[in-house]
Image (cartoon, rainbow, N blue to C red):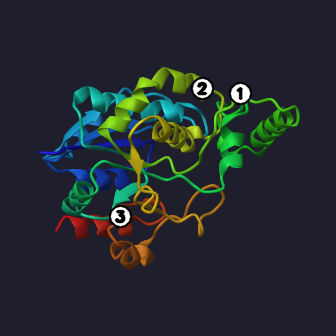
């Protein structure tokens, strides 16, 4: 049986996380879960008891800050833990605001038909922004409250602009930008992990490079190794940035239910859901896919 590993990084939104785990629960899947060490009210036994068919593993909790390289470390920790368990056909990285929007039969059938392809979002004409995020020193992202502090974000931006003015660059790599979410093969997962320590060093004091490092590493591998990506299907996730607010995508509500459930099989997952905005759409999707 070809097994898949679901790698989930979450910090709250536990109703959505419970629904995601129940929708993933299948004897063809294993689940690897990281909960931010700064999150409260997490009950490990409750989440371990949610599954009937999958194996679920809770990895060591560490503190994760938005925009900080700790986001990359958690992604690599999840990937490393999963590959140490066994070789999975695919590794799907998700966050706590994501849900599958297709049944596991449809998901497994899709990957069987597209076996060997990597599914990752790489945006066109975003090299300058990727360069800004990854090739300058961002000293303030580790500060508590950075995401919501106009002062810290302005100071960080000013420092990055000064580096640009003086042509200070960390290295000469070509950087690529896209969503942090991905579905990759065992071969690519292990190739990425061979560079784990170098990646962690390279992306220290960068800005939100969980949206850069995987794209950049995979583009290197395309040139060096025999791997293939399907750019037409991106990362198989529906994320609506057009109707989002600030640096967050749209949060789906019950009004989006019919649209979400009638998407083609090129969209297997969706983001973003928030129980504090609309819990009913989460419950309705779960009910539809588990009946």
Which of marks 2 and 1 precedes in the sequence? 1
- How far separated are the C-alphas under marks 3 and 2? 38 Å
Between the residue at mark 3 and the residue at mark 1, the CA separation in whole angstroms equals 43 Å
Residue 89 visible in this rendered orientation of the protein: yes
For the residues carrying marks 3 and 2, which lies nearer the camera in this image? 2
- At 23% across and 34% down in the image, what residue appears? 87
On the image, the x and y values in percent for residue 235 come to: 43, 55
User: Which quadrant of the view contains residue 131?
Assistant: top right
Count the numbered circles shown. 3
Nearest the viewer among 59 and 125 is: 125
| Marks 1 & 2, CB-CB < 8 Å contact | yes
- Residue at the image point whose x is 61% and y is 41% from the top: 208
Mark 3 / mark 1, whichever is N-terminal: 1
Q: x, y (%) of residue 206?
A: 65, 33
Residue at the disc numbered 3? 282
Left or right? Give the position of 73 relative to 3.
Answer: right
Q: Residues within 10 Å of mark 3 (few under 14, many from 20)?
A: many
In the foreground, 191 or 121: 191
* Residue displayed at 57% across by 35% down: 65
For mark 2, give the secondary structure.
Answer: helix
Q: Where is residue 108 drawn, in percent x and y?
A: 22, 56
Q: Please state the horizontal and vertical placement of residue 223, each as a whole percent of the image.
A: 49, 39
Residue bearing mark 2: 202
For residue 174, side relative to residue 121 (left or right): right
How crowded pointer 2 is (Cα within 10 Å; few <14, some 14-19, many 20+) is rated as some
> Which residue carries the number 1 mark?
170
Answer with mark 3 or mark 2, whichever residue precedes in sequence: 2
Q: For this view, does 15 lie left or right of residue 206?
A: left
Residues tagged 3 and 2 counted as in contact (Cβ below 8 A): no
Task: Indicate the quadrant containing the C terminus: top left, top right, bottom left or bottom right.
Answer: bottom left
- Residue 95 visible in rendering: no
Q: Is residue 168 above or below residue 153?
A: above
């Amino acid at each position: 049986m070809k097994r898949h590993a679901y790698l989930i990084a979450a910090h709250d939104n536990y109703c959505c996380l419970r629904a995601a785990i129940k929708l993933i629960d299948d004897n063809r899947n294993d689940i690897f879960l990281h909960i931010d060490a700064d999150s409260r009210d997490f009950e490990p036994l409750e989440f371990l008891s949610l599954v009937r068919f999958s194996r679920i593993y809770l990895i060591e909790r560490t503190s994760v800050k938005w925009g900080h390289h700790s986001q990359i470390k958690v992604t690599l920790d999840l990937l490393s833990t999963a590959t140490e368990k066994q070789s999975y056909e695919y590794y799907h990285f998700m966050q706590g605001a994501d849900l599958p929007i297709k049944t596991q039969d449809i998901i497994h059938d899709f990957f069987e038909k597209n076996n060997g392809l990597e599914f990752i979002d790489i945006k066109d004409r975003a090299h300058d922004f990727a360069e800004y995020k990854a090739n300058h020193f961002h000293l303030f992202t580790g500060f508590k409250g950075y995401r919501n502090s106009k002062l810290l974000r302005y100071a960080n931006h000013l420092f990055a602009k000064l580096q640009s003015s003086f042509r200070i660059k960390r290295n000469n790599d070509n950087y690529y930008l896209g969503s942090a979410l991905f579905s990759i093969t065992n071969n690519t997962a292990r190739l990425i992990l061979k560079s784990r320590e170098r990646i962690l060093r390279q992306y220290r004091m960068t800005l939100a490079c969980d949206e850069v490092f995987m794209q950049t590493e995979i583009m290197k591998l395309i040139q060096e190794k025999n791997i293939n990506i399907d750019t037409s299907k991106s990362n198989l996730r529906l994320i609506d940035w057009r109707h989002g607010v600030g640096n967050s995508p749209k949060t789906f509500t019950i009004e989006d239910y019919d649209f979400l459930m009638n998407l083609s099989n090129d969209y297997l997952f969706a983001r973003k859901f928030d129980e504090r905005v609309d819990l009913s759409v989460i419950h309705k999707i779960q009910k539809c896919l588990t009946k």
